[in-house]
Structures are given as structure tokens and as C-alpha cells.
Image (cartoon, rainbow, N blue to C red):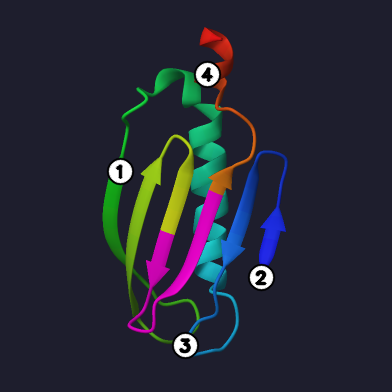
Amino acid sequence: MQLSDATHDYDCGACGTTGGVCMEGLWMARRLAASIADRAALLPADFELVSRTRFTGCGRACAVDMRVTPTMVQITAGSMGARVEAEVRIPPRAALASG
């Protein structure tokens, strides 16, 4: 499933367990993407955050890998690899300020 907001396009793969979008992954991706967009001018271009956590929102505990950069959020959840990706559709504020 594909979704968009004012600054990002989201590509959501299906969860191997529920067959639908990983709603916890989408929720997390939208919040991370918004937070990064709000602070893009303060982040170095090579900023990267890599994290592991666990989602339990659908009643099943899934291992989650996350990767965040100023222009992208990738979340992969569960052994079946449900994924949510957010990509910046407009230049980050840091690029706008320097250009």
C-alpha cells in the first residue's frame, strides 16, 4: 500500500502474519519521518540511526529493525519481513537552506 503526507511517500508491504499493513510500523515511520523533517537543518548529511526493537501491537511480538537517515526511514518487522519505508518527496530543510 502506498500513502503520502506533505513531505513523505510511504510504501507499506504486507505483514506475513496478519496479511495487512503493519500499523505499528506505519505509525512509527510517520512519527520518525516528521521528527527528522522538523530537525533536518540540524542534522549532518551523514546522520544515520540504526535500532532494533520489538512491536507487540497486533498481539504477536515481532523483532523490528529500523534505519533512519535525513531522507529515509526503513522499518522491517517480524520473521516474514513486513516493511514500511518512508522517502522524502521534497528536499530536506538543510538542503533548502544551503541551496
Amino acid type at image mark 2: Met
Marker disc for residue 95:
4
The span from disc 2 to disc 3 (Cα, nearest Å) is 14 Å
Amino acid type at image mark 1: Leu
Which of the two labelled residues, at mark 2 and mark 4, occupies the earlier sequence position?
2
Image quadrant where residue 89 sits: top right
Count of numbered tags: 4
Amino acid type at image mark 3: Gly
| Residue 81 located within the stretch drawn in magenta | yes
Pointer 2 residue: 1
Taking the spot 48% from the left edge, 38% from the top edge, the residue there is: 71
Pointer 3 residue: 16
Q: Which of pointers 4 and 3 indicates the residue nearer the eye? A: 4
The span from disc 1 to disc 3 (Cα, nearest Å) is 26 Å
Measured as percent of width and height from the top left, residue 36 is found at 48, 35
| Residue 59 located within the stretch drawn in magenta | no
Measured as percent of width and height from the top left, residue 13 is found at 54, 73
Residues 23 and 73: in front is 73
7 relative to 58, above or below: above
Pointer 1 residue: 49
Q: Which of pointers 1 and 4 indicates the residue nearer the eye? A: 4
